[in-house]
Amino acid sequence: MKIAVTGASGLIGSSLVPHLRRQGHEVVSLVRREPRAPSEARWDPARGHVDLSRLQGTDGVVHLAGAGVGDRRWTDSYKQQIRSSRVDGTRTIAEAVARLDPRPQVLVSGSAIGWYGERGDELLDERSAVGSSFLAGVTQEWERAADPARDAGVRVVHPRTGLVMARSGGAFGQLLPLLRVGLGGPLGSGRQWWSWITLRDEVRALTWLLDHPVSGPVNLTAPAPARQRDVVGALARVLHRPALLPVPAFALRLVLGEFAGEVLVSQRVLPVALEGAGFAFDHPDLDSAARWTTSG
């Protein structure tokens, strides 16, 4: 298959692209600068432009681009960037997909479990209602922005990704160095549910969604969500380090501002659609995920 990927340099994309190539797929990375190789195509989401000539014959598109929600403090302007980078970027890709002739068979358009907002101990699946937080509102607009491709008859999948357990990069890339020197512990109460997935399973699931007849929202989370203190504890055990130093909620809010609310949120999400369609996780439980994440 010929696959186009946005966000190819990000945490997930930088692992997905080589994985796809190892599987024998031709991959075209969409970039905002001038292309430097035949495997790149120019796009400008702010202007709604995509170089369609480089995407002719594309079988599938994986759209992952978007400003990082934890990259900086949430000012009003950065919140607008979080929203626009997702909504405008998705609309640009969806409209490009709809214009291609022939059209790609599938658009895997990134989303997140931020859709659900704060839900306490409630078990959540793809049928659960949207939440009321800032990120829930962004995610709802983000998914709707793919409508041009859906209306054109393209199969559209929204992988609602959970907390990605990676050896470097992302939230866990920042957490692991602290744990290695014994400085990890509960965030706030530590009782909030974390719905996690290893980077390996994230990449495998995205690849799997390209050629399996699944559409609509699909939770990309492992089948064993755990409380935050237990996730940190599992990582610490593998590293033979303590995980006892709590970070009070007020301290997180002081450092992170409004984003602290998303760090402390509780979301107990299950991958009902993904498992129901036959996907098998390499790391379905917290212990195997902790061993993989700390093995690099």
Image: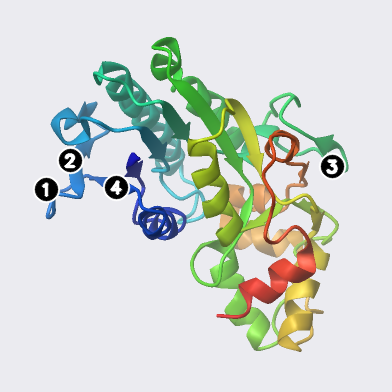
Image position of 22 with respect to 93: above or below: below
Disc 3 marks which residue? 120
Distance CA(mark 4)–CA(mark 1): 20 Å
Label 3 with label 1: CB-CB less than 8 Å: no
Image position of 177 with respect to 274: above or below: below
Q: Toward which corner of the image does residue 165 lie, by quadrant?
A: bottom right
Q: Is residue 85 visible?
A: no
Disc 1 marks which residue? 34
- Residue at x-position 45% and y-position 58%: 11
- Residue at x-position 79% and y-position 85%: 242
Q: In which quadrant is the N terminus drawn?
A: top left
Label 1 with label 2: CB-CB less than 8 Å: yes
Task: Name the residue type under label 3.
Answer: Gly
Residue 35 vs residue 175, the one in the foreground: 35
Label 4 neighbourhood size at 10 Å, few (<14), some (14-19), many (20+)?
some
Q: Is residue 148 visible?
A: yes
Distance CA(mark 3)–CA(mark 4): 43 Å
| Residue 102 falls left or right of residue 132 | left
- Residue at x-position 67% and y-position 54%: 263
Q: Which mark is residue 42?
A: 2
Image position of 263 with respect to 79: above or below: below
**Sequence-first tag of 3 and 1:** 1
Mark 3 or mark 4, whichever is nearer to me:
4
**Sequence-first tag of 1 and 2:** 1
Residue 32 vs residue 107, the one in the foreground: 107
